[in-house]
């Protein structure tokens, strides 16, 4: 079972921000911004390559709830999903990084 599936199953602890039937959001263990949250589907999907439009429609609403919950909706934030080697994906369970709480830098190569 992958790392994030273990977090979904509460086999590994995580600092949870928001949860519903289908999705889970928790703080990144190694934050790259003052706010760094990971949003995942509870059912395992390898990456953005495999996710369905139906899941993405619900994920969009879930991420909108998260940014309201942690009050970064108006100050601004960034949503990223890394895919594969060039994208720098380390955990092979689809996740969206939600970064905020400071003016973020841009440009990574
Ligand atoms: P990726 O590089 O796959 O896009 O991002 C994986 C993210 O998961 C990284 O930002 C990393 O800090 C985070 N991460 C890795 N292991 C754990 C963990 O056990 N718990 C939490 N909360 N985050 C983790
Ligand atoms: Zn998984």
Image (cartoon, helix red, strand yellow):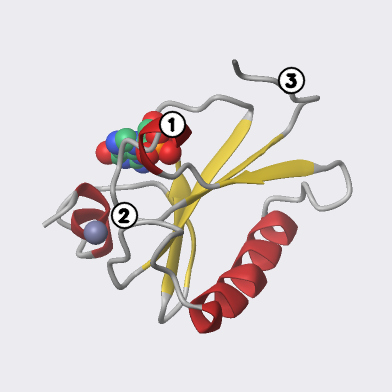
The residue closer to the viewer here, 81 or 27, is: 81
Whether tag 3 and tag 1 are in contact, CB under 8 A, the answer is no
Residue 102, compared with residue 19, is above or below; it is above
Q: Quadrant of the N terminus?
A: bottom left
Within 8 Å: ligand 1 and the Cβ of disc 3? no
Report the side of 49 relative to 53 (left or right). left
Q: How many marks?
A: 3
Q: Quadrant of residue 77?
A: top right
The residue closer to the viewer here, 56 or 83, is: 83
Within 8 Å: ligand 2 and the Cβ of disc 2? yes
- Reading the image, the residue beneath label 3 is 105
Residue that protrudes farthest toward the right in the picture: 74
Q: Does any portion of residue 29 appear in the rendered image?
A: no
**Marks 1 and 2, how far apart at CA:** 16 Å
Residue 59, compared with residue 73, is above or below; it is below
Rendered location of residue 74, percent (x, y) = 88, 49
The residue closer to the viewer here, 49 or 6, is: 49
Rendered location of residue 42, percent (x, y) = 34, 70
- Reading the image, the residue beneath label 2 is 93
Instruction: Give the foreground label among 3 and 1.
Output: 1
Q: Secondary structure at mark 3?
A: loop
Q: Earlier in the sequence, mark 3 or mark 2?
A: 2
**Marks 3 and 2, how far apart at CA:** 26 Å
Residue at the location (63% across, 59% down)? 66
Instruction: Give the foreground label among 1 and 2.
Output: 1
Q: Quadrant of the C terminus?
A: top right
Rendered location of residue 3, percent (x, y) = 21, 48
- Reading the image, the residue beneath label 1 is 86
Label 1: how many residues lie within 10 Å, few (<14), some (14-19) or many (20+)?
Answer: few
Label 2: how many residues lie within 10 Å, few (<14), some (14-19) or many (20+)?
Answer: many
């Amino acid at each position: 079972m992958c790392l994030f599936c273990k977090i979904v199953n509460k086999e590994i602890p995580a600092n949870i921000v928001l949860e519903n039937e289908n999705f889970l959001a928790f703080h990144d263990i190694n934050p790259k911004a003052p706010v760094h949250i990971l949003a995942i589907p509870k059912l395992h999907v390898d990456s953005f390559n495999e996710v369905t439009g139906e899941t993405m429609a619900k994920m969009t609403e879930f991420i909108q709830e998260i940014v309201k919950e942690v009050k970064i909706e108006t100050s601004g934030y960034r949503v990223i999903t890394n895919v594969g080697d060039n994208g720098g994906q380390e955990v092979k369970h689809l996740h969206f990084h939600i970064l905020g709480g400071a003016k973020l830098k841009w440009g990574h190569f």
